[in-house]
Image: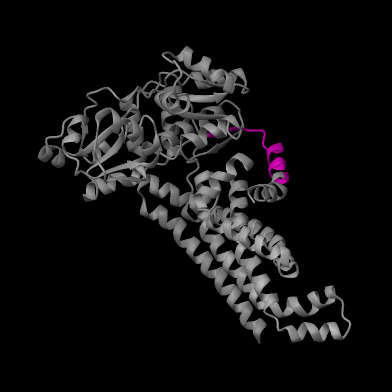
Amino acid sequence: MRIACISLVLGLFLPIAILAQDNNKEVVIGSKLFTESVIIGEITNQLLIDNGYQTQYKSQLGGTRILWNALLEGEIDIYPDYTGTIIQEILNGQNIDSHQALNEVLKPYQVQATKSLGFNNSYAIGVNKETATQRGLKTISDLAKHPDLKLGFSNEFLDRNDGWKGLSEAYNLPHQQVTGLDHDLAYRGLEAGNIDAIDLYSTDAEIQYYDLAVLEDDQGFFPDYQAIILYRMDIDESMVSLLESLEGTITESEMVALNAQVKLEGESDEQVAANFLDDKFSIKSEVVQSTVWSRLWINTLGHLYLVGISLTLAIIVAIPLGIAAVKNSWLEGPLLAFVGVLQTIPSLALLVFMIPLLGIGSLPAMAALFLYSLLPIVRNTHSGIKEIPASVQESAWALGLSNRFILRKIELPLAKPTILAGIKTSAVINVGTATLGALIGAEGYGQPILTGIRLDDTALILEGAIPAALMALLVQWSFDLYESKFSN
């Protein structure tokens, strides 16, 4: 069943992917979900553009594994990361104690790293100062005396060897109330008192804003997380020289200030990156300030692109599958079970499963949406034809009509309302699910939602959520209107 699923996706989307790659010759820069990574990615992007390179910047792509795999697959060429993350999470078990040793280990992957950009962004554990005073919390070891505390950690921190798994073992922490949540939302949870301790990045601007107490890592568990830029070895040497020019240019306090300008003062990532390059390199980058309407237009086109192509392909494939299921009794059970299983796969997991096949961006998102759209159409086509009274078909056979004629002129027209209902259901599901595509770099209404969550900006979240809801309603009303006219 899994092989059939992969074959179906590859057959439909691989030719599109190959064409897309052939037309995509620019340098592709990626970044993780959090603000600091987005800013460094933007600095790199503007630096390369100023030096004549054609670039494509894919920001907020996801966590470490997604970016690392995308780099190995050539989906991106460059992205910022941290030494501790690479050594502990990707190259765990390797003996790496220097920049030279790191690059030697990275060489078989066809990847290299710059030296430190100048700052260390280590993990830390933070609590409200009131909680720290009441519980006498000064070090991470002190947490062990308070097993009733509720801990809220980012999902990536929960699963990493240098995160909660290793930390809880090293400090023998007995806590059972440990929740995974978005890093940016954790600050709100801490302020509201829903959780008592969260993981921090030491350069987070929110540490000072929320006046948090940072617990001392008294056993030295967390390694250094020097900021670096990873790049594929097949980029040209002059580009490598440009990346190396960023080495040692950002101090820890400067990075905190850059994060604060975006997260607390409302500056755009692009403008903050441009100001940095102006200060450090006298580079004058042109930053185009987008309006709400221009972003709405671009996101609407992106969303329609995702939904339109995936739904059209689903209709083309699913209706014949539904017909095949009702006409071939041996195929009926396995086929309906197959599309049913596809629907049970969590949407986020399905998006990630598509990355090894189709990379990152809109193509894997379209493939996932296509698979999600199959079940309602296949099932409704099957049931619409199967529920036609047997006497109708027997009368047609008695008149000597061919099976093809009966299908085209009698069965499909009679089943049309049921089939349309299946397409409507798929379309509405498709519009809502497409917002998740932003997690792997797809365009559409998910982008402002993701950025809004990152910046704790409700207006930005609504900028994606409201149009997505309206589009779903518009799709439903359009089908309802068509059905009412058809039924009359």
Side of 317 where 469 appears, left or right: left
Q: Residue at x 26, y 46 (%)?
A: 177
Measuring from the top left, give residue 81's x and y in whole percent.
45, 28
Q: Residue at x 28, y 48 (%)?
A: 188
Q: Is residue 22 magenta?
A: yes
- Which residue is the extreme one toward the front? 330
Side of 163 where 416 appears, left or right: right
Measuring from the top left, give residue 133's x and y in whole percent.
11, 38
- Which residue is the extreme one toward the right? 400
The C terminus - image quarter: bottom right
Instruction: Give 481 or 7, whichever is nearer the viewer.
Output: 7
Instruction: Give 454 or 350, whichever is nearer the viewer.
Output: 350
Q: Residue at x 50, y 61 (%)?
A: 468
Q: Is residue 321 magenta?
A: no
Q: Which residues are magenta?
A: 15-30
Q: Is residue 327 above or below residue 14?
A: below
* Residue 360 visible within the image: no
Measuring from the top left, give residue 152's x and y in whole percent.
29, 44
Side of 224 where 3 appears, left or right: right
Q: Is residue 46 above or below residue 366?
A: above
Q: Quadrant of residue 316?
A: bottom right
How many numbered circles are shown?
0
Side of 296 where 84 appears, left or right: left
Q: Is residue 157 above or below residue 91?
A: below
Measuring from the top left, give residue 202's x and y in whole percent.
30, 30
* Residue 147 visible within the image: yes
Q: Quadrant of residue 98?
A: top left
Instruction: Give 192 or 223, whichever is nearer the viewer.
Output: 223
